[in-house]
Image (cartoon, helix red, strand yellow):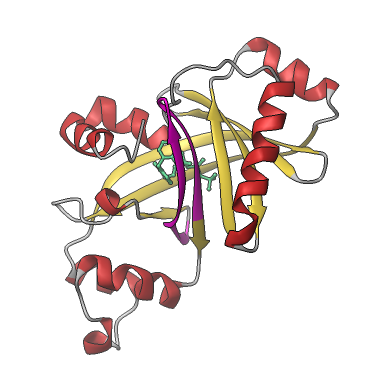
């Protein structure tokens, strides 16, 4: 699956606008994410985001379709939860040959590559569904950072432009403030906890 997303700053009025457009609360949940990378940030500097969400391994890898205009960007990522597929995707990025270490699983492969946790945070999330196609998440992390996200899931890269336009149309209907790019939760974490890593990714225009 491919995820198309746009983050926004949450304010008191947005929830009312969402509800007036028919948004329905579908889930409240809390989860803990642990993100992994090498010491030289081989994954994140290539826009690969490997995490364990509670017990489940997840990888977001870039699709190559990315719009970054005037400081605003929407992003699209391929999402994978199958451990063997994750290894296949990160193997070339980490310059390692899994085939030589076939007997180990993902966790052991990460050890071999010296991939370590660099960010751990818990998120409290309220998810809304709107017009069947949009999911809107309102998140607050354990450090108090609040951020919203409009998300659409699509099956094919050929649908990215159309989905991006639909998200833009919804953003206008919700009157989302047109500000510069909104920091995600990991960006916010790195700003406070690892400014060097943050600066590296910011300069590469990977995070805001
Ligand atoms: C930092 C980042 C990624 C890691 C995951 O970030 P995020 O979208 O904040 O996670 P979350 O918890 O909302 O995931 P979900 O539950 O929706 O699967 S993936 C890509 N980046 C780079 C990035 C980005 N996509 N957008 C912005 C504004 N900054 C950085």
Instruction: Say whether residue 179 is left or right of residue 87.
Output: right
The number of callouts visible is 0
Depth check, front residue: 195 or 143 = 195
Picture quarter with the C terminus: top left
Q: Position of residue 192 (x, y in %)?
A: 26, 25
Magenta range:
55-77
Query: Does the rendering let one see residue 134?
Result: yes
**Residue 202, quarter of picture:** top left
Residue name at image x 68 percent, y 17 percent: 175
- Residue 74 belongs to magenta span: yes
Residue name at image x 40 percent, y 25 percent: 143
Picture quarter with the N terminus: bottom right
**Residue 198, quarter of picture:** top left
Residue name at image x 70 percent, y 39 percent: 166
Rendered position, 38 above or below 97: above
Residue name at image x 29 percent, y 54 percent: 46
Depth check, front residue: 37 or 103 = 37
The kind of secondary structure the magenta stretch mainly shows is strand
Q: Position of residue 185 (x, y in %)?
A: 42, 33
Instruction: Say whether residue 146 is left or right of residue 17.
Output: left
Instruction: Say whether residue 183 is left or right of residue 157.
Output: left
């Amino acid at each position: 699956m491919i995820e198309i997303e746009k983050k926004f700053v949450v304010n008191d009025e947005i929830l009312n606008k969402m509800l007036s457009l028919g948004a329905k609360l579908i889930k409240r949940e809390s989860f803990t994410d642990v993100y992994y990378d090498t010491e030289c940030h081989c994954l994140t500097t290539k826009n690969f985001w490997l995490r364990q969400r509670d017990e489940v391994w997840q990888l977001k890898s870039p699709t190559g379709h990315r719009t970054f205009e005037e400081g605003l960007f929407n992003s699209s990522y391929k999402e994978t939860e199958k451990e063997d597929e994750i290894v296949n995707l990160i193997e070339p990025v980490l310059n390692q040959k899994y085939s030589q270490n076939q007997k180990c699983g993902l966790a052991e492969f990460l050890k071999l590559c010296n991939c370590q946790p660099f960010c751990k945070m818990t998120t409290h999330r309220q998810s809304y569904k709107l017009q069947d196609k949009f999911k809107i998440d309102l998140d607050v992390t354990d450090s108090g950072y609040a951020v919203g996200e409009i998300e659409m899931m699509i099956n094919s890269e050929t649908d990215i432009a159309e989905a991006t336009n639909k998200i833009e149309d919804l953003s206008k209907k919700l009157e989302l403030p047109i500000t510069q790019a909104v920091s995600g939760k990991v960006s916010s974490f790195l700003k406070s906890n690892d400014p060097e890593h943050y600066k590296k990714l910011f300069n590469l225009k990977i995070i805001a």
